[in-house]
Amino acid sequence: MKIRKPFVAVIGAGQVGATTAQRVLEKGLADVVLFDVVQGMPQGKALDLMEAAPIEGHDRHILGANDYKDIEGAEIVVVTAGLPRKPGMSREDLLTLNAKIIADVCANVKKYASSSKLIIVTNPLDLMTHLAFKKTGFPETRVFGMAGVLDAARMRFFIAERLELVGRDVEAIVLGGHGDLMVPVSSQSKVKNTSINSLIPEQELKQIEQRTRDGGAEIVALLKTGSAFYAPASSVCEMVKAILKDEKKVLPVCAYLRGEYGIKNIYFGVPAELGRNGIEKVVEIPLAEEEKKALLLSSEKVKRGVEELERLGL
Ligand code: TXD
């Protein structure tokens, strides 16, 4: 299948990778190269997706690949490659295994797509994004992670459900590290310019914030095997669209900080403008005192993670 530029390369053709490919194609955003180390699997998924095209009515192409050469010249590389935690495996074991995968992916991205924008999805998100930044040596404007768009979408849905509204009419923002210390920013959440604080009683809002923090775990518990992928894929696609269409849209992105929000030298979830060049600008928004404190606490956890990466020599 002939791939036309600008195209998106998706590394890892599992649940999130394949669904991201599907969304990019079916929204007509770009052609896609879907790469995986498992032989035949990305080709099978690519063929299946092409066979859906006559019905879906798009004219995009997708190529399944086991050879990194096929990602040559990609405009955006989305990295979903990784292993899930298995029974008996420690967090540290998983960190080491996924770090090795990210290092291998980065070596190939450097070789074949050295001017691409890199969107990291693999967990632990903030640390894998940090590692990708180090391993590629790309400027920080071209290496960032996806988490905040997903966490905010979850919060938007929970607010919409509570107020019996449509999710797209709700604005919400979630900042910080992608984990149990993420910071849902209720002070900036709105429905058509009305602050959420005046629509939902504080106690209920706290419950929505907690459900947002536990959003990933809630789905894992229901699915029993694997983790969320529909909303994660939509979130990646939103970022891909902002870049390809040079929207300069402000989205919560895992970005490298150099003192913004009083935090530096780590990758952390903050609002950032996404456009053709990747991160065009990190945006500082006003926060309530409590939110500022929560953000600093979350940043301490990410810092400890970066120290662990260094201690493990990764
Ligand atoms: O908000 C977020 N950032 C996240 C992160 C939301 C959802 C999922 N999140 C994480 O993404 C999740 O914890 C995992 O670390 C990744 C991918 O999740 P997915 O659900 O797609 O996992 P799968 O289905 O197991 O797919 C992973 C694929 C699988 O096909 C492997 O064969 C492949 O990765 N894989 C590799 N591809 C390329 N290169 C190497 N080395 C490799 N190793 C495994």
Image: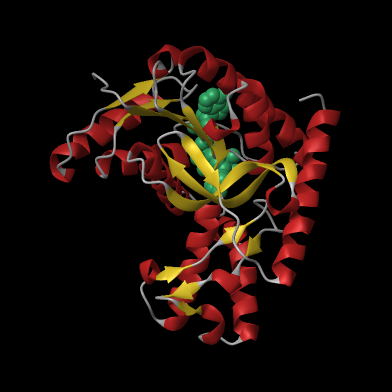
Answer left or right for 208 relative to 290. Answer: left
Choose between 260 and 65: the one closer to the eye. 260
Snapshot quadrant of residue 218: bottom right
Snapshot quadrant of residue 257: top right
Residue positioned most to the right? 311
Quadrant assignment for ligand 1: top right
Report the quarter where the C terminus lies: top right
Q: Is residue 220 above or below residue 205?
A: above
Image point (75%, 46%), residue name: 302
For the image, the number of numbered tags is: 0
Report the quarter where the N terminus lies: top left
Q: Is residue 85 above or below residue 170?
A: above
Q: Is residue 288 above or below residue 111?
A: below
Is residue 124 something that shows in the picture? no
Answer left or right for 211 relative to 244. Answer: right
Choose between 302 and 52: the one closer to the eye. 302
Q: Is residue 99 above or below residue 84?
A: above
Answer left or right for 172 relative to 54. Answer: right
Answer left or right for 223 relative to 312. Answer: left
